[in-house]
Structure formats: C-alpha cells, structure tokens
C-alpha cells in the first residue's frame, strides 16, 4: 500500500535510530548489537538509490551489516563486540567485528553528511552534495584509483527529485 511508513525507508531509518538514541541517552543500558544492525540495515537501500558511484560502498556496507547481524546471535551489545576484539587482539584485523563496525559507522556518516549537504544545497543535482560527502567521509581512506572511479561515477547520480521518488519521499503519497 503506497504511502505507508513501510514504503518509506527514511521513516524506518529515523524511527530505528531514534530508538537507539533513546537507549544511548538513557545511560541505563548498552546498545544492543541486534537493534543496531537492524537499524543499519534500513540504510542499505539509500546506497542503492545513488547508482553506480556508490555500488561498491553499498556492497561493502551490506556485507559489514550482515556480519554484525550474524554476530548479534552470540554477542549482545556493541561494547561487548569491542571488548571481545580488544581481548582477541584483532581490532585492526580485516573481517573483525570491530573493523566492520568502523566501516558501518563510516557508511552512516556518509549518509548523514550527504543528507546535510542535500538540505543545504540549492538545485536538483546531487553531484556536489555527494562529492562533498564522499570527500569528507570516504576519500581519506581510499587510494587514488578508487577516488577517481568514484569521481567519474558522480556524473551518473540521480537528481534530487529522482532520489526522493526512489525513496517514496516525493510528496505524492496516498496519505
């Protein structure tokens, strides 16, 4: 049914992260890994909506979120993930849950900065907001070849209107 909250990824993301924020702000409990990975999974479609420029980021992000979701079956909290990897001396090891958590955080940062830039920008192009977000979040961790490939892909981004339509946020819902 068009116009429901289930059809609106941004609404699901907002609600999930508000719940996580309430947990963090309560200082009563640690953030559950399952709730965190579930909230992060709602962000995945955003990368897909951005096209080829962010295809690698989407695949990497989804794999890392899936790893954290699988880990949540035996590890209850984010703090426990970090503590285990510190004890196992594998925080910096490729594929460790902590390193995957870092990559997921960067993905979340990318989306946050992208939407901040979209809100601040005028016009319908996503090239400048996406370029600024990539430069701020991912570029410092990528080599020259990846940075150049992403720069080339920026020309294939959807317009702001197309992105909002893909996210069912174009203002034409059945509400």
Image (cartoon, rainbow, N blue to C red):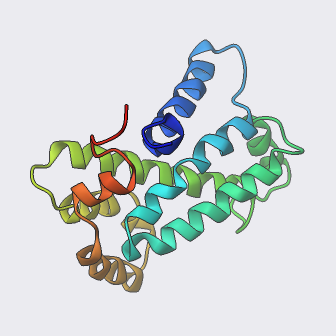
Seen from the viewer's position, the closer of residues 35 and 172 is: 172
Q: Is residue 83 above or below residue 88?
A: above
Residue at 38% from the left image edge and 48% from the top image edge? 168
Relative image position of residue 107 (x, y in whole percent): 49, 55
Q: Could you tell me if residue 66 is visible in this image?
A: yes
Residue at 73% from the left image edge and 66% from the top image edge? 95
Residue at 54% from the left image edge and 56% from the top image edge? 44
Seen from the viewer's position, the closer of residues 170 and 29 is: 170
Q: Is residue 124 left or right of residue 80?
A: left
Seen from the viewer's position, the closer of residues 41 and 4 is: 4
Relative image position of residue 29 (x, y in whole percent): 72, 19
For residue 163, which quarter of the picture? bottom left
Q: Is residue 20 above or below residue 26?
A: below
Q: Could you tell me if residue 78 is visible in this image?
A: no
For residue 175, which quarter of the picture? top left
Residue at 70% from the left image edge and 69% from the top image edge? 94
Q: Is residue 86 left or right of residue 55?
A: right
Relative image position of residue 15 (x, y in whole percent): 52, 29
Toward the left, the furthest residue is: 122
Q: Is residue 103 above or below residue 153?
A: above
Q: Is residue 37 above or below residue 20?
A: below
Seen from the viewer's position, the closer of residues 98 and 171 is: 171
Toward the right, the furthest residue is: 74
Give the total of numbered labels: 0
Q: Is residue 54 left or right of residue 27?
A: left
Q: Is residue 102 left or right of residue 29?
A: left
For residue 79, which quarter of the picture? top right
């Amino acid at each position: 049914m068009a116009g429901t909250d289930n059809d609106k990824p941004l609404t699901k993301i907002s609600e999930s992260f508000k719940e996580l924020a309430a947990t963090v702000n309560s200082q009563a409990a640690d953030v559950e890994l399952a709730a965190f990975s579930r909230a992060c999974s709602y962000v995945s479609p955003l990368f897909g909506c951005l096209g080829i420029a962010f295809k690698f980021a989407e695949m990497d992000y989804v794999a890392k979120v899936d790893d954290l979701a699988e880990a949540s079956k035996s590890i209850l909290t984010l703090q426990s993930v970090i503590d285990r990897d510190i004890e196992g001396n594998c925080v910096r090891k490729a594929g460790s849950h902590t390193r995957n958590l870092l990559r997921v955080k960067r993905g979340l940062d990318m989306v946050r900065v992208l939407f901040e830039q979209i809100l601040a920008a005028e016009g319908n192009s996503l090239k400048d907001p996406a370029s600024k977000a990539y430069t701020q979040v991912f570029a410092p961790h990528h080599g020259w070849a990846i940075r150049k490939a992403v720069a080339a892909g920026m020309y294939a981004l959807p317009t702001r209107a197309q992105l909002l339509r893909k996210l069912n946020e174009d203002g034409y819902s059945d509400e």
